[in-house]
Structures are given as structure tokens and as C-alpha cells.
Image (tube, rainbow, N blue to C red):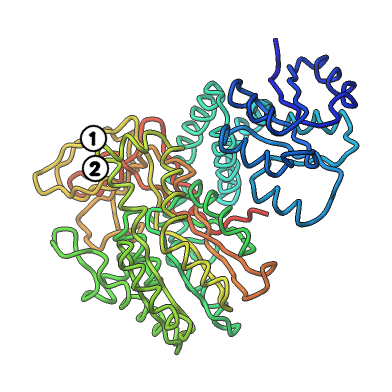
Amino acid sequence: MTLGKLLWVDDEIEMLRPHILFLNKKNYDVVTATNGADAVDLCRAEDFDLILLDENMPGLSGLETLSLIKDVRPGVPVVMVTKSEEEDIMDQAIGSKIADYLIKPVNPNQILLTLKKNIHRQEIVTEATVSGYRQEFARLGMQISEPLTATEWMELYKRLVYWELELSETDDSAMRDMLRMQKEEANHMFARFVKANYAGWLAHPDTRPLISPDVFRRKVFPLLDAGRKVFVLVLDNFRLDQWRLLSRELNEDFAIDEELYYSILPTATQYARNALFSGLMPEQIRKMYPHLWVDEEEDEGKNLNEESLIAEQLKRFRRKENFTYNKVNDSLAADRLLGQANRLGTAPLNVLVVNFIDILSHARTESKAVRELANDEAAYRSITLSWFRHSPVSDLFRLLSTTDQDIILTTDHGSIRVDTPSKIIGERNLNTNLRYKLGRNMSYNAKEVYEVRRPADIRAHPLDGLHLRHRLTLLRLPEQLQPLRAILQRHVPARRHIARRNDRPAHHATPAQTMNKTVLPSTRTGALTTPYGQGARPH
């Protein structure tokens, strides 16, 4: 069985017979041509997996032939073979999108390597990826079953996200299914970990891992103290796996330093983002700034006071820095912000909230068209990447790369696609949030939720008569971690850092509450309310 059909175009083709015989023995079918015109005719008549094209031929030159071949077979990789290493010829060839080039005299092994890179790359990558995951599968399984610290859960989550992205590039569905089951088990064990430790974290702030209310105090303020200007960009509902794709787009302009942290519970925007901007737990916000807190039963938007909460946090820590605050819900608002970009560099602290990814996440539930476009997590990541590449946010990063600012890229929470939702029944006025339930007389399966009898114990809600239960609805690690910290320094790419925070995953399963209970949703397969991520180090 042939491994591929090749076209080799060279006016001295007879001198290349040993190479052609070598390729024949390697099970490649090689068709030859001695000039550009014949090569173009062959391309019109036959399909080829790869074309080897001499640069210096009588009649049509290699570059001229290349242009004609691209018109006829635009998708076929073309490898330029040349005696010349002149820069302008190489520039023209690369500009014409050659797949590779070889310098005469060519070595048979060089040709073989080129074929593997351009014809068999996917098979080789798939084989290597599958082999790598098989080797790590047992180790990850043992790690999941062991008692882990908060830091070790973060590292485990990073590995699971890494393999999810790697396996998504392969066509091995069996390995992807194995990873999915391993993630479910990790979610289950992580849910146990959070339930056992979360209340203790709140009771011992000096020894707990980094959580939402600590981000400004421990990550932003030290940069301001060092005399740096800081740009905090919060992408609502942003996950670690999405961050990893976006970080590849930012690598050329920024050096990225990734760090993870935990979001508070519930991971809903009202709680997690307000805690991030205020530096306080929800219960503390309600007591200290009652005019800035909106209760569940009120119709008013729950995140309309973010700028005031930032101002109060600065005031509470006796900080004198001026700051700007902007929220972007669509491209028009982003364009207007870019038009005022000069203003963003004048204040020591700039905060920007971008809501598109959150909108996309909700649309995946509500819109059949979006559901079809994002029918799995790989497709969902792809849409996110496409949005970033073509959105004004990408332009904003290019602009920031020319300024001398430290960038902190993070989020308030993530999202998750729930396959096994839980059923929760309550009174008519039961809140509709999918991440948690706050109400009375609820019925649910207690094994599927994280139930807190006294909300004050986790400072989640100021009302004493309510039990808080957070159901970790199919919490997936990838959706809970996010890069937190990034530093950008103008004209010094090696020192620019970008970090993002991935807070707890968005739990898209039915949450629940019972009388005197607040219920945060969970899943039968378990839920990983894993560490919220901060910036990731792609290097």
C-alpha cells in the first residue's frame, strides 16, 4: 500500500533517480516532470499528496510554476528544492506559502523527514500523544485517588487540561473517552476535597490558598507599590482550557506567567466577581456596604456596583491611586473603548470587564444554532479563539503590548457542560440561578450537592435562616482554573507576563436549596470546584 503520491519537478530529473528509487522502496509513488508546464498539466489531471519543485528551471521558473500550481491545487503542500540561498528568493517562496524547502544536494533522509512533516504529521502526532497519555494515565489515576493539597489539585488540573487539549487534536476517540472518565473521577474527588476544606479556608485566611477576595490585595497592590501601572482584564466565564488557546496568540507579544487560584462559592457572578472587586466575602459586603449589595429577591442587576466596590477596597487599604473602570458587552462598546485607549494609560490602575464569553456560554444553552456550533468542548474552544482573533479585544492586547503596564488577565468563574443534571424541587419563588439555590422547602438528593446548613459559616449569604448548599454540578477542572497574573513591559517581551484566573467552574446543572438551606448544584459524577486559575506559563 502506497504511503503517498508525489510529483517531483526538476529539469535534471535523471540525476535524481537514486532518490526516486529510495522513495519507491519506502512505498511512495513518485511521478516526475522536467519542466513547469508539464507539472501544471499533471496537477490538473492527477491528485498528489506533495510536490517537490526545483527552483531553477528553463522556461517557467520554480516560483512561476509554484504560482500556477497554487491556482490549480491550492491545498497541496509544495516543497521548494533549490541550489540558491538568496534571501529574496526564499522570501518570495515563503510568501507564496511553500510548505518547506530543501537545499541541493538533497539527502534522502532529509526528503523523508519533509514527507513525514507534511504528509504524515497528523498520524505521528496522534501516535505520540496517545502513547504519552497511556504512559501518564496510571500515574494520574493514582494521584486522583490520593489525598491532595490545594496546590496539588491545581497541578493535577493543569495536567488534565493539557491532555484534553492534546487529545482534542487527534482522531483517537477511545483515548478521549478515557480522559473524560478520568476527569469525572477527578471531579468527584475534588468535590470531596472542597467540601472538607472550604469552610476551614475562610476561617484561617493566613494559611488558605489564594481565593477571590485576596486577588487585589496579594497580586494587584504589590505591583502598584512597586510603581508599576496595572491593567486588570476580567473575562467573564473564562476557563483554563480557553486561556491556553488564547495564550498561544499572545506569546509573540508577551511573556506569560501563569498562576491559579480558587474562586469562592457560589461561583455565580454576583458572588465571585463582587468578592474579587471588593476584597470581601458576600456576607461582609452586605454588612459593610448595604447600599452596594443587591439581595436575591430584588430585580435589580447584581453586578452594577463593581466600580464602587473597587473604590471602596482601595479606600479600605488607604490607597490613593486613581483608577478607571469599563465594562464591555459587545463589539461596539469595545470599539468605543479602543477609541479612548490613551485615557487607559494615564491612571495607575485600569480595570476592564468583558462579557462576551459569558454571553456565548448562555447562548449555548438557549440557542439551537449556537448549540450546534459548539456541540462539544473542542468546538466551544474554537469559537472562543475565533472570537478573540477577530474581536477588538485582540486589538486591545496589541495596543497594550506597546505600553509599559503589567497586565493581569483573569476571570470570575468558568462554565461546564452538564450531562447528568440533578433535579431540585422548591417553592415558586426559588431562585433560578443554575449554580446554587437559595430558598425554602426544597427537595433534592443530598449526595449530589454541597450543603451548608449555616451560610454564615462560609460567609456566602447574610441571611441567618438559610442553609446554603452548593451543588458542584459536574465541575470540571478545566472550567475552574484561570490564569491570574500577567506582566507586560514595553519593548521587553521577555519580561512581559500575562496571567489569568480561572475561578471555579460554572455549574450548569440545577442547583438547589432547602428550607434554611442554600444549595449549590453538584453532579452524580462529582464536581471539581477546582482551584481557580491564574496565569499560565506557556513557555
Q: Residue 54: which quarter of the image?
A: top right
Q: Secondary structure at mark 1?
A: loop
Between 109 and 284, the one nearer to me in the picture: 109
Q: Quarter of the image for the C terminus: give it.
A: bottom right
Residue at (37% x, 34% y) in the render: 375
Query: Which amino acid type is shown beneath numbered disc 1?
Result: Tyr
Residue labelled with disc 2: 512
Residue labelled with disc 1: 444
Question: Quick check: marks 2 and 1 in contact, CB under 8 Å?
Answer: yes
Say if residue 135 shows up in the picture: no
Total of numbered circles in the picture? 2
Between 279 and 205, the one nearer to me in the picture: 279
Q: Residue 213: which quarter of the image?
A: bottom left
Q: Is residue 333 above or below residue 128?
A: below
Q: Secondary structure at mark 2?
A: loop
Q: Is residue 507 above or below residue 405?
A: above
Which numbered disc flags the more N-terminal residue, 2 or 1?
A: 1
Q: Residues within 10 Å of mark 2 (few under 14, many from 20)?
A: many
* The label number, if any, that marks residue 195 in the structure image: none
Question: Where does the image place residue 35, in percent across and percent down from the top left?
Answer: 75, 31
Query: Which amino acid type is shown beneath numbered disc 2?
Result: Ala
Residue at (43% x, 78% y) in the render: 341
Between 376 and 297, the one nearer to me in the picture: 376
Residue at (47% x, 58% y) in the render: 201
**Left or right placement of residue 92 versus residue 243 in this view:** right
Residue at (76% x, 27% y) in the render: 8
Q: Residues within 10 Å of mark 1 (few under 14, many from 20)?
A: some
Question: Where does the image place residue 130, in percent across and percent down from the top left?
Answer: 64, 27
Q: Quarter of the image for the N terminus: give it.
A: top right
Question: Where does the image place residue 353, in percent across and percent down from the top left?
Answer: 37, 66
Question: Where does the image place residue 389, in percent across and percent down from the top left?
Answer: 47, 55
